[in-house]
Image: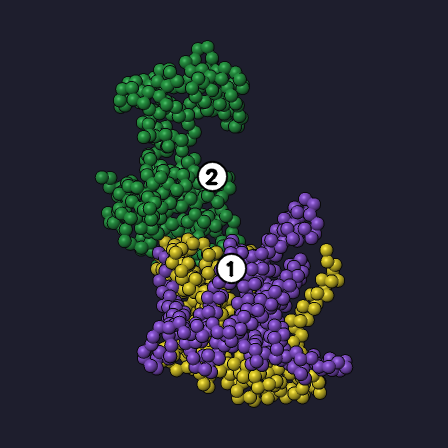
Amino acid sequence: MVNKQLKRLYTFLIFLFLYAPIIILMIFSFNSSKSRGVWTGFTFKWYIELFKNEEVLTALYYTLLVAVLASIISTIIGTFAAIGIHNMTSFKKRVVLNLNYLPVLNPDIVTAVSLMLLFRFANIDFGFLTMLLAHITFNIPYVILSILPKLKQLNKHLAEAAMDLGATPFYALRKVIIPEIMPGIVTGALIAFTLSIDDFVISFFTTGPQVTNLSITVYSMARRGINPVINALSTLMFLSVLILLIIINKRTSKDVKHRGDFI
Amino acid sequence: MEKNIIIDLKNVYKKYDDLEVLKNINFYIRKNEFLTLLGPSGCGKTTTLRIIGGFEQPTSGEIIFEGKNIINIPPYERPINTVFQKYALFPHMNVFDNIAFGLKIKKLSKKTIEEKVKNILKMVNLSGFENRSIESLSGGQQQRIAIARALVNEPKVLLLDEPLGALDLKLRKEMQMELKNIQKSLGITFIYVTHDQEEALTMSDTIVVMDSGEIQQIGTPVDIYNEPKNAFVAKFIGESNIIEGIIHEDFVVEFENIMFDCVDRGFEKKEEIDVVIRPEDLIIENFEEAKLKGKVISVTFKGVHYEMLIESDNFLWKVHSTTMAPVNSLVGLSVLPENIHVMKKVR
Amino acid sequence: MKLKWTSYPYIVWMAIFIIVPLLLILFFSVTSEDVFRLGEFQFTLDNFKRFMSPIYLKVLGRSITLALQSTAICFLLGYPMAMIISKAEVKKRNAMILLFVVPMWMNFLLRTYAWLTLLGKNGLINYIIKSLGFEPLNLIYNNKAILLGMVYNFLPFMVLPIYSVLIKIDNSLIEAAEDLGASKLEVFTRIILPLSIPGVVSGFTMVFMPAVSTFVISSLLGGGKYMLIGNLVEQQFLWSGDWNFGSAISIVMMIFILISMAIMAKFDEDKKGGSLW
């Protein structure tokens, strides 16, 4: 119906639309002047400034710290939760799952302000702890979402077989179930990590003075105007996400070949 | 009470929500016996097995194992092992680790474990398979590893939940023989669940026929085949012709308006009953001289015999015979008295 | 034998961090004054009444309009893209989808910031326009910029679900239709399009929801002049300190989103909608 040339052109335009801003951002991170329009020369100075910028470095520190802690904790809680939910009877399961997906379905600003109210209500000082708790809260549903399908695929008699052979329920969990669902656990952890690194809205509302993350820093810098340091930051972040994504994709395609199902 | 009993199920009753899955199950299992729970899907045989294994709890009733009620003992503390229907082998472990799983929990020495695994692999004819991954195994091989994994723990009782269901016919028949041999040589009690009556007849010392949560009949394969207690058992085991009749007095039964000598007694005079005759017990006779006459409706060659459908006045008889009577021919049928089985009518 | 208890820690967590906060929002929306400070409160619907005034309704209207427009544009641009990718051969289309997903995982703010550089008075686009001899355009700090930002950010969310449903359409259905005499256009309108509805609904949902509740895009690209409902909430909570009113607005947003989801669910009764992974 539509000829190949038209398709190619359309695809090209769309991808151009998607990537042009990012590529231009990256190109101008090497521009020696602050101008967004004129290329004046190649330089690394914005990168150097980036690494000297206190604001950015602190933000990077907190971003990574929160992301690592939140993904580990949410993976642990989420794994146990998924196993428990999987074994529930259908009514309770539906209720719990629907509640679980509330942070996913709710606009993040509502989740953010509701958590803000909670912390105020409990008289907790806003800062690292509140941000961490908030991150864990919105990470867990995604961990559960990654693990539940793996549990469904699991032969339901595996745990019974283990217990039949003398394993206590906990031993069976440790030696049989968790190794089996490990791909789902790892994917869940990676997704949680990526979400945390990227988060803005929820962090914005639940953090306190001194504690900030990269997104918040970018936001405040952007509101002040264009700053090529942000460009440099974007380039680095883009490259790291690209690498992370390739890893995730390699894992899921390995999984596809392994299990023979279709993603 | 027999001293030889290893498991005794007393008044086992199981209800799921509103569904009565097991109603008043009572039977015992002898040591070193090969006992089969036989019945159609949903009859409760698997539930019974799982209750013995400890994976389900009965709503009421007792499971007496060597004199003690084990109802409250979890599966990992019962000296019973199970071979699951889909094998339930641990995919992320190789053959050795699967088999050694139970032994490791018992904290046996490395050397002992290695030896035991080697020996059990030899017994199931899979020597050398220690390092193979589960996915590299064929269905039949996985089957045998599942059996090995259970048996290596030297349980007092082995439970088998339709273990041969996924295998093709030839393999299934080979495995039936192997399982029977293993059971005999190890002297372990086997409790086997299947819906395949032929399998049950081949392998068992005792068969418990179940339907709708109730025991229909318990007996040896020969007893159940030859003397089905009711229409259900008769229909489920082997093929049968079941026709209504009246037993006039001991040893005399009437059906098709004809009197026949039989070997059953103990019924009321002129009681309405069901008569069961196996297709292979009907003999093709000369039309003129026979008591029971009919016309051949269809003939199918089955290799071992011909299967003929013969229509008499009141009934369509299924006959297995090596004598062939062509379609539309008129034939007579006769049957020996000992092959006429009289059963009480169901409800 | 069922390991149900492993979920209990999380259930407690959910109660504290999901249920209680939402209840608090509800509570705040129907009370006045800072409950914590004054220690006393009265139930009132004033907050909601306040929202019903023209200024705020205008904001709601603007948010919905922009969200609908961006959803529509994403659909018009995204559906053909999804079709093109789904028709490519397996290796190529996996690569294409990966390329589509990559920007999605890039930091949301940076993606939006990227347009700041391009659209500004001295930005790249205007630079090109100026060097071609034209007058610079007013590309930023207006409705159109926000719309552009929304489409840019949410386009992959429209393409992915539609794509994942399209590839699941059994090829033999198309062949059967052609065998029965349908033209390419008819195959599309009568077979492909109807079967892709679950994916379309998914895409609509995944674009409309964040679009209607965003405040970052309007904040950065609208220059603070264009308030959307998300900005309103932010303002109430972080600047005005009127948490009661802010909560009321949040409740309105949630109700609104629940309604939209219910409407979307009606279209996807079989729950066949494609998901992100």
Which chain did the image draw in yellow? A
Percent across and percent down for residue A99 are: 42, 64
Choose between A127 and A112: the one closer to the eye.
A112
Q: Quadrant of the C terminus of chain C?
A: bottom right
Say if mark 1 contacts mark 2, CB within 8 Å.
Answer: no
Q: Quadrant of the N terminus of chain C?
A: bottom left
Q: Colour of chain C?
A: purple
**Marks 1 & 2 on one chain:** no
Q: Residues within 10 Å of mark 2 (few under 14, many from 20)?
A: some
What residue sits right under mark 1 in the picture? C263
> Is A64 placed left or right of B340 in the picture?
right
Question: Residue lying furthest left in this view?
Answer: B1
Q: Chain of mark 2?
A: B
The residue at 32%/79% (across/down) is C39
Percent across and percent down for residue C8 are: 36, 65
Q: Colour of chain B?
A: green
Choose between B59 and C145: the one closer to the eye.
C145
Specify the quadrant of the image occupied by residue B327.
top right
Foreground label between 1 and 2: 1
What residue sits right under mark 2 in the picture? B173
Q: Chain of mark 1?
A: C
The residue at 53%/28% (across/down) is B303
The residue at 61%/77% (across/down) is C142
> Is B330 placed left or right of C80 in the picture?
left
Quick check: B236 above or below A135? above
